[in-house]
Image: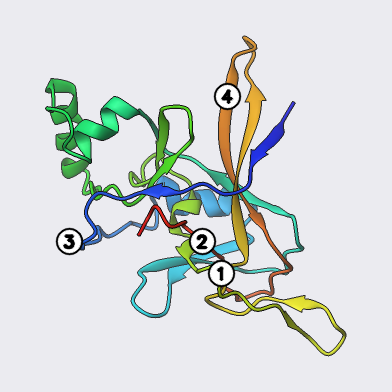
Amino acid sequence: KVITIEAFCGFGRLNHNKVPSRPIIPSNSFARQSSIKDGGFVEIRPAPDGKGLGAFATVAITKDTTLGEYTGEILKRRDVEARYWQKRKRNKRDREWRDSRRRRNQGISGDYLFDMGNEEYIDGEDSDVSSWCRFVNHASSTINIERYDEDGNSISVAGECNAKACIRLSWDEEENQVRRLFLVALRDIKPGTEICYDYGEEYW
C-alpha cells in the first residue's frame, strides 16, 4: 500500500557561503550503478554550467512516470544538528561517522539532506548507500515555460524543471509506517534531456 502525501519537499544546506569541493564519485559506486539497476533509462554524466554530474534521460519518459527513489542514510534531527548544523556537540558516534566519510572520500557538506517532515532526514551524500537520484540537479519551477512541438505535445528543454519530489507512505512487514521519497516526471521528457527539479527555497 502506497499513498502520496506531499508533492514537494526541501533540502537542508549547511553553509551557503562556503562551497565545498566535490569528491570524485567513481563509476562503480552504488549511486552510479543504481541507475543501471533501475533499468538504464538515465545516464550519469557531466552537466552543463559547472553543476558537476547530472542525470540525463536515455529514453523517452512520459509524464507522471516514477523516475526513481531518493535513498541514502537515514538521520534523526539530532544527528543532523550535530553533524551538519553545529547546533549540538558531536559525540563519539558523530566523530566515527565523520571519519568514515573522510576515509571513503565521501562529502560532508550537508547539501544532500532531504527533510522528510517527521524529524528524519534522508542524506544522499554518501554515494556508497545513496541512489542515482542524488545526481539530479536544481531548476526553478517558478520560471518554467511550457514548450510544445509541432504536434502540440509538451516537451522538455535542458535545464528546466521537469520532475518533482514526492513523499509516499508505505508499510513494512510489521505494519510500521515508512516514508519514502520518489522523483516523478512533471511532463514528457525527451532522450538526452537533463532531469532537474526545484530544490525549494529552504535550500538556498
Q: x, y percentage for residue 147?
A: 71, 82
Pick the residue in front: 35 or 193.
193
Q: Which mark is residue 142?
A: 1
Which amino acid is tagged 2?
Asp
Q: CA distance from mark 2 to mark 3?
A: 21 Å
Residue at x-position 22% and y-position 40%: 85
Per the image, the residue denoted by label 4 is 178
Per the image, the residue denoted by label 3 is 18
Q: x, y percentage for residue 110?
A: 28, 47
Residue at x-position 46% and y-position 65%: 138
Q: CA distance from mark 4 to mark 2?
A: 24 Å
18 versus 31 height, above or below: below
142 versus 136 height, above or below: below
Q: Residues within 10 Å of mark 1 (few under 14, many from 20)?
A: few
Which image quarter is the C terminus in? bottom left
Which amino acid is tagged 4?
Val
| Residue 38 visible within the image | no
